[in-house]
Image (cartoon, rainbow, N blue to C red):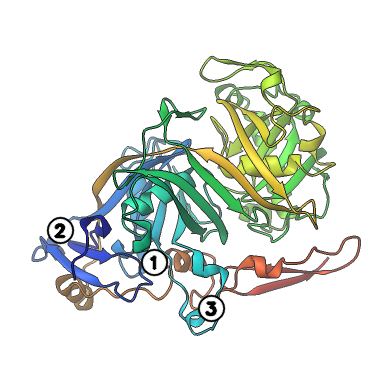
Amino acid sequence: MRVAPRLLLRYRPLASDLTFKNNPNSTNSTWCRGSVRGIASRSAQSQIPLYATYYRGGTSRAVILQPQGLPADRKRWPAIFRQLIGSLDSYGSQLGGLGAGTSIPSKLCLVEGFHKPQDQLLKAGKTEEDDIDVDYTLVGLGIGKDEVEVASNCGSMSSAIGPYAYNAGLLPETAYGRGDGEVTVKIRNTNTGKIVHSTFNVTGDQASVLGPYTMDGVAGTGSKIQLEFKDPYGSKTGQLLPTGKRIDHIAGYNVTCVDGPNPVIFIRADELKIDGTILPNELNKRAKKLVLLESIRRAAAVRMRLANPEDMVPRTIPEIGIISMSSTHTVLSGATIKSSQVDLVVRFISATQPHHAAPLTAAVTTAIAARIPGTVVEQLLAPDLVDDSAITIGHASGRLKVNVTMGRSYPVRPTSATVYSTARRIFEGNMFWNDEQQPTDEQEHNVLSGTQKIPKRSLGLAFVLESRGLDPSAPILPLRHYLSRPLPRRQRFRTIRIRLGGEEDAEDE
């Protein structure tokens, strides 16, 4: 059967080139043998090629891989990921990989066509998962340490997933051949179980890159990408306010703990006795303040029941938002932002480092907190919004607008949040990793014959579950199924936390 070149995706598992045609859920999807090179010397090679793409998404960058190109043994993945990014670098430079000594590019994304679990294929009727196009897994890497984390999503890199999936031919055939215009890709983030709809323009059968849209924190202009986060709360705990309070007293400070697309804790800049418009380089010089903020973050994480004890708190979540009222101030570009141009000012700390802009998931969580009366964020919100339809956040590089829709029947629960971003493909081709293990006969046979099997479930999701000590073969139930009704207030109730593996943690509160 003839398949248009546009619908072919090439990646190189181990030393071979294989072709995967279209969507893995399609009955016509097959593994095809491509050109095979260097197989005879496979066992003698010191480096193994891995097909990859490098993207900027929003104010971040990351390597994007299709996990089918990785070894079948997922226990080997962390070591490969560290090599690609250059982790375990005691000098902090990451010269051995594509990291740059900061948390922003020290990550990679696993993207694959959505694999509906086999146990759900047997069920009659339509489910919400029938509309998902791709699975996306974020992997965060340490710089000087060996961390390989799957605790959270990256909103900025979410901007790149839709265009990447389109260009790579991962979408159903109906998504192609329509000519220029808008395309919407429905993405499931396996780290949080949340759904993101990415809408962008297509030009000449490729995701558009050029356009007039400007994004503060990114030089130049690009084609606008709309990200709509569905049910953007409870990503880790199942609750919008995991502590049950709008303000908590932690380590002597008033903070608000919100679990949005990612968990964030908010604290007033004036309570910390720092200027709320401080820039990242200056904040980095305030070592004692950073130590204090980290201690507050860890204590808040335990209070939110993200981890226990404090030394088990992930590096990436919760993030910190330092809040102050709108004011006239200078941003990193040297431009001046007037008080009338923003609704509030936030300085974010992400993965223990001051962020040069606004992580999109943290920005969405900020906008949600601003819509909840009584939170630290709402208390500092300007009385007259710049735009009645959105919250305009001032960050270290400029401004970002976030539109949040709250529920009608339960007005302190968000139903969706929309932000705009841009993305750009920087390169694609082979990366290389050092293979210290000799391939087994079965692995060699699979490479030579091109008989890699279509996975029955998302490989990225399986990696997330195994990283959390869960069984990847367990039934999966979407988190929202357990949040269809408002949780009771002012009384003891059972909080059901659904982990991606379908297990339940029930606790009395």
Horizontal side of 335 relative to 240 (left or right) equals: left
Q: Is residue 99 above or below residue 258?
A: above
| Residue indicated by mark 2 | 45
- Residue carrying label 3: 474
Above or below for 126 versus 54: below
Considering depth in this image, is 359 or 194 the residue closer to the camera? 194
For image coordinates 71% across by 44% down, the residue present is 368
Which badge, 2 or 1, is on the more N-terminal residue?
Answer: 2
Marks 3/1 in contact by CB < 8 Å: the verdict is no
Residue 157 spot, x, y in % from top left: 46, 45
Q: Position of residue 287 (x, y in %)?
A: 62, 29
- For the N terminus, the image quarter is bottom left
Q: Which residue is mark 1?
A: 75
Badge 2 marks a residue whose secondary structure is loop
Q: Which of the pair 176/79 is nearer the observer?
A: 176
Tell which tag, 2 or 3, sits nearer the viewer: 3
**Residue drawn 60% across and 69% down?**
478
Q: Quadrant of residue 86?
A: top left
| Label located before the other in sequence (2 or 3) | 2
Kind of residue at disc 1: Lys
Report the amino acid beneath label 2. Gln
